[in-house]
Image: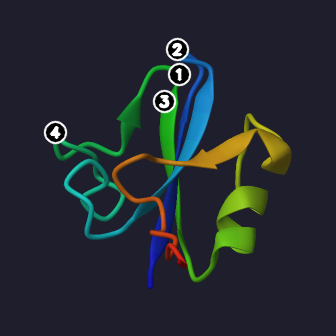
Amino acid sequence: MELWLYESKVTKQARIHKAECRNCNNGMGQHGKSGGSGRIWSGPFTDEAQARAGGRWFQPSEVRWANCCAPRQSISN
């Protein structure tokens, strides 16, 4: 699975996205651009640890999964 990291100084957040996510679009975002002022896509990464460590503006502990891409956890009875 290919992952990308979206960082935004505007919203003060960093989120991991799957490459096929409509918001990520293989690091090109929704509008076909790689970012803008205060926003950047980094990647691709092959795993979560690489994505967390690949940030330019945020520490790995500040990086979260994007809601639309977060891995689903199984619920056990």
Point out the residue furthest to the top here.
10
Q: Is residue 29 left or right of residue 66?
A: left
- Specify which label sits upstream in the sequence, 1 or 4: 4
The crowd level at tag 1 (other Cα within 10 Å; few <14, some 14-19, many 20+) is few
Residues marked 2 and 1 touching at CB (< 8 Å): yes
Q: Image height check: is 60 above or below 8?
A: below
Secondary structure at numbered mark 4: loop
- Point out which mark residue 10 bears: 2
Q: CA distance from mark 3 to mark 1?
A: 4 Å
Q: CA distance from mark 4 to mark 2?
A: 17 Å
- Circles 3 and 2, Cβ within 8 Å, touching? The answer is yes
For disc 3, the marked residue is 39
| Callout 3 touching callout 1 (CB < 8 Å) | yes
* Mark 3 or mark 2, earlier in chain: 2
Q: CA distance from mark 3 to mark 4?
A: 13 Å
The mark closer to the camera, 2 or 1, is 2
Residue under the image location 52 percent in, 17 percent down: 11
Q: Residue under circle 1?
A: 38
Identify residue type, mark 3. Arg
Mark linked to residue 70: none
* Residue visible at 52% across and 71% down in the picture: 73
Q: Looking at the picture, does residue 6 appear above or below residue 71?
A: above
Point out residue 20 in the picture as x, y percentages from the top left corner: 26, 70
Q: Amino acid at mark 4?
A: His
Give the residue pinned by disc 4: 31
Where is residue 21, by image quadrant? bottom left
Q: Position of residue 63 (x, y in %)?
A: 69, 45
Badge 1 vs badge 4, beta-carbon distance below 8 Å: no
* SS at badge 3: strand
